[in-house]
Amino acid sequence: MKRNNKLSTIYLSIVFIILYAPIFYLIFYSFNSGGTMSGFEGFTLDYYKEVMQDTRLFIIVLNTIVIALLSAAIATIIGVLGALSIMYVKSKRAKNTMLSLNNVLIVSPDVIIGASFLILFTMIGVKLGFISVLLSHIAFGIPIVVIMVLPKLQEMSPTLVDAALDLGASRLNVVRKVIIPYITPGIFAGFFMALTYSLDDFAVTFFVTGNGFSTLSVEIYSLARRGVSLEINALSTLLFLFTMVIVIGYYFINQRNNRVKGASVKK
């Protein structure tokens, strides 16, 4: 048993090193005064200052955050309604069909999804830009929310709903005062997952952005194509740190919900 645990620890350590080594390499050289990624000559914050003073970049950061928050919020609302629909549909065949359709956007390659949205928006006359990016992010955020919320619905005892109905509560009140509070951790998880996916998405966004509109991931790609610049490192570092703040925030919220739930069970 101890040997298996040791092997698991070694395996996870190797995986984390492979995943995070390039990120920390990028972060390390974002402070290099030499202007290259071949040798560290001295510490500087010049590249971060250049990023902060770039008005166009500030607008792109604002676009990215607004798109992420809006798409995650709307996807969460629709995803919760979708999860409730899937959970309480009576036909098993209909339920399996809805689950399969929900999972299509998750398992499909991003390039195919992006190209499909591009063709769709072109056909129906939606101008590529803020609206097209927002709609795309909502679309791939909904299945993520459904996947996070559905397990919470499935673990909830049906007797809670039956008891509330027997006590005279309307179905709307049951949803508001029984179901929603119970599945709140799943809703938060779905929101933060959709937010993170929106922030770091590149492939889908690349297809549906128009002239004059961009997000951070697309902008980093554009800068990288022009040549290696440590501004890219600084910008990528800031995006990584912002994502980490979101992940840590979600962790503490989840831990708090678990403590509250544990305390209520003891009572």
Image (spheres, helix red, strand yellow):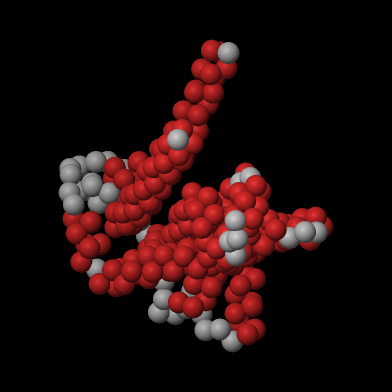
Q: Position of residue 68 (x, y in %)?
A: 43, 64
Image quadrant holding the C terminus, namely top left
Along the viewing direction, whichever of 222 and 100 lies nearer the viewer: 100
Q: Position of residue 42 (x, y in %)?
A: 17, 43
- Left-right relation of 1 to 249: right
Q: Is residue 204 above or below residue 186?
A: below
- Left-right relation of 171 to 95: left
Q: Residue furthest front?
A: 167
Residue 234 showing in the rendered view: yes
Q: Position of residue 8 (x, y in %)?
A: 54, 23
Q: Residue at x 67, y 62 (%)?
A: 85
Q: Residue at x 44, y 69 (%)?
A: 70
Along the viewing direction, whichever of 249 and 168 lies nearer the viewer: 168
Residue 247 showing in the rendered view: no
Q: Residue at x 64, y 77 (%)?
A: 119
Quadrant of the image occupied by residue 141? bottom right
- Left-right relation of 223 to 5: left
Q: Residue at x 62, y 70 (%)?
A: 115
Image quadrant holding the N terminus, namely top right
- Left-right relation of 194 to 124: left
Q: Position of residue 88 (x, y in %)?
A: 70, 58
